[in-house]
Amino acid sequence: MKYALVTGGSRGIGRAVAIRMAGMGYHIIINYQSNDVAAEETLALIREAGSDGELLRFDVSNREATVAAIEQWQTNHPDDYIDVLINNAGIRRDNLLVWMEPDDFDRVLSTNLYSFYNVTRPLLQPMIRHKHGRIISIASLSGQKGLPGQCNYAAAKGGLIAATKALAQEVGRKNITVNAVAPGFVKTEMVDGLDEAELKKQIPLNRFAEADEVAAVVAFLASDDAAYITGECISINGGLYT
Ligand code: NAP
């Protein structure tokens, strides 16, 4: 059995990734924070895709809770290890920096960036022992060019891209690849409230992405076909920023 952990797998891009990875034969560990109903729906879709999975609820921004959940999983699966990690869980709390409350800065950094440390570190030793692993993080266009109103989010996603490049150099010899993708605008609940009709005028492909279009690139990076790609951040933005 090959195991893939998808953080934030209950909805949006994480759900699309979970279904794609299920189609590749992985047993999917669906992490999420609070939406039990959505997580159960993802699990049902994974089973429809011909694989199986399990729910693992924890807050990726909470270091102790994250480590405890992963250690418990490992204790329950002494002969297995998590071969693929998709660092996907994320939030945004947009505001101009001059108005941004400390909590909105801290929450976005802890959920989108510190989570990289919290989740990845406990999974690294088993990957190193098995001499195989794939770590793929969902960054953002915002982390590449910066978007106004997103000093918190851009800092977190930019940090995620930098951490990806650094870790790739640390673990390449252990046959572990570490990559990121940087989506532009993707049709999920995260973009609810944005003016799609207005924003898409700036996008050469003239539309927002479907979550599955991001999942397709993530699945490729997890596959054997991408064995020689590491330390990369692949843009998926319809030509918005090149
Ligand atoms: P979404 O639809 O809002 O889903 C967010 C997911 O993250 C949910 O599964 C949620 O769980 C989970 N989550 C949030 N905080 C968490 C926490 N502290 N611990 C564990 N799980 C947590 O978002 P999305 O659009 O799919 O975004 C997925 C990733 O893509 C994020 O990292 C986001 O920054 C990035 N991204 C999105 C876009 C876009 O346009 N949508 C563009 C670029 C990058 P619950 O269901 O339990 O709440």
Image (spheres, helix red, strand yellow):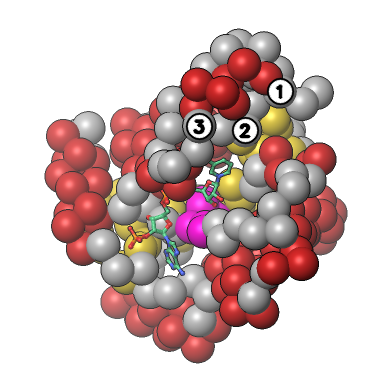
Residue shown at 51% from the left, 52% from the top = 88
Would you name the residue on which mark 2 appears? 184
Q: Position of residue 82 (x, y in %)?
A: 46, 60
Q: Residue 207, can we see it? A: yes
Q: Which mark is residue 97?
A: none
Relative to 167, residue 11 above or below: above
Query: What residue is disc 1 on?
Result: 240
Q: Residue furthest bottom?
A: 64
Q: Is residue 226 above or below residue 109?
A: above
Residue 186 vs residue 84, the one in the foreground: 186
- Within 10 angstroms of label 2, few (less than 14), some, or many (20 or more) residues? many
Q: Amino acid at mark 2?
A: Gly
SS for dot 2: loop
* Alpha-carbon span between mark 1 and mark 3: 16 Å
Report the span colored magenta: 85-91
Residue 164 visible from this viewpoint? no
* Residue 139 locus on image (x, y percent): 65, 47
